[in-house]
Amino acid sequence: MVSVVADILQVRPDTVDQALDVAIEALRAGELIIIPTDTVYGLAGELSAHVARRIYAAKNRRYDLPLPVLIADLGQLAQVARSIPSAAELLGRRYWPGPLTLVLQRAESVPSEVTSGGETVGVRVPDHELMLAMLEHYGSPIVATSANPSGCPSATQVSELSDSLLDAVAVVLDAGPCTLRQASTVLDLTTRPPHVLRPGPISAEELSAAVDMEVVLAGNCDGDRTCGR
């Protein structure tokens, strides 16, 4: 059986399926959940305008900060991106699952509330077994951002989650500490040259070598405002 403390499910090898069933049921009901990724714990929900508004409210997040989208694999990218440049396919094959968020032109299926009214969306495939299993079983992209009040440190384990966020979600999946403990690199592929909006585990130099083109650091990146994906 899954051990439940309030709304927190302790995930063990023998309870993974039960925990995923509970989380997916919550997603389909339009509820928010907290689940670990390879980088930090994420506050997540279905890809909808209603859920995006709930995430902004739960985090006390400014509405001009876009929310990122998580997908199960490179094959789902076409569901959320209007066009997929060759660099995105190359980088996706090389670094996904992994700590790289690609900023692309959003598809019409992505609500404007997710992108703060903009025409781009940040997309990633997380390298975490539990999150990937949930994405695969759920079958659709989700919106997910770091599970912390805006401006506060990101949570890399459940004990670091704030009471305010715990009150805002239906389910928390506790699978222990996140492995990387650092937010993903954010690369904007809608600009020429591509810009790193948020430095992370994958450097601009690595990305430049991977796509055989110049990749530069954005000069106005402040970590949360410009790069708050």
Image (cartoon, grey):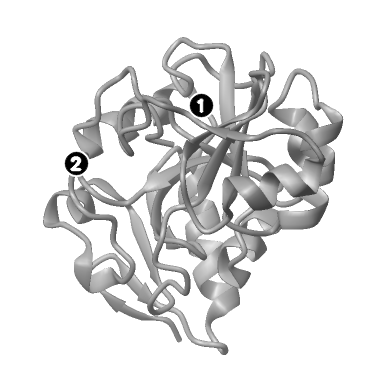
Foreground residue among 152 and 49: 152
With 212 as the anchor, is 170 left or right in this view? left
Q: Secondary structure at mark 1?
A: loop
With 144 as the anchor, is 209 left or right in this view? right
Task: Name the residue at 58% across, 55% down.
Answer: 202
With 58 as the anchor, is 196 left or right in this view? right
Tag of residue 27: none
Tag of residue 151: 2
Task: Name the residue at 75% across, 30% down.
Answer: 79
Identified by mark 1, the residue type is Ser
> Measured from the top left, where is residue 206 in percent x and y?
67, 52
The answer, for residue 199, to whether it is visible in the render is: yes
Foreground residue among 19 and 160: 160
Badge 2 density bin: few <14, some 14–19, many ≥20, Cα 10 Å: few
Q: Secondary structure at mark 2?
A: loop
Q: Quadrant of the N terminus?
A: bottom left
Quarter of the image holding residue 87? top right
Tell me the distance, in whole angstroms, between the alpha carbons under discs 1 and 2. Answer: 24 Å
> Measured from the top left, where is residue 189 in percent x and y?
67, 27
Task: In the displayed orientation, state which residue is furthest to the left.
Answer: 163
The residue where tag 1 is placed is: 48
Foreground residue among 118 and 71: 118
The answer, for residue 74, to whether it is visible in the render is: no
Task: Name the residue at 25% across, 50% down.
Answer: 148
Quarter of the image holding residue 163? bottom left
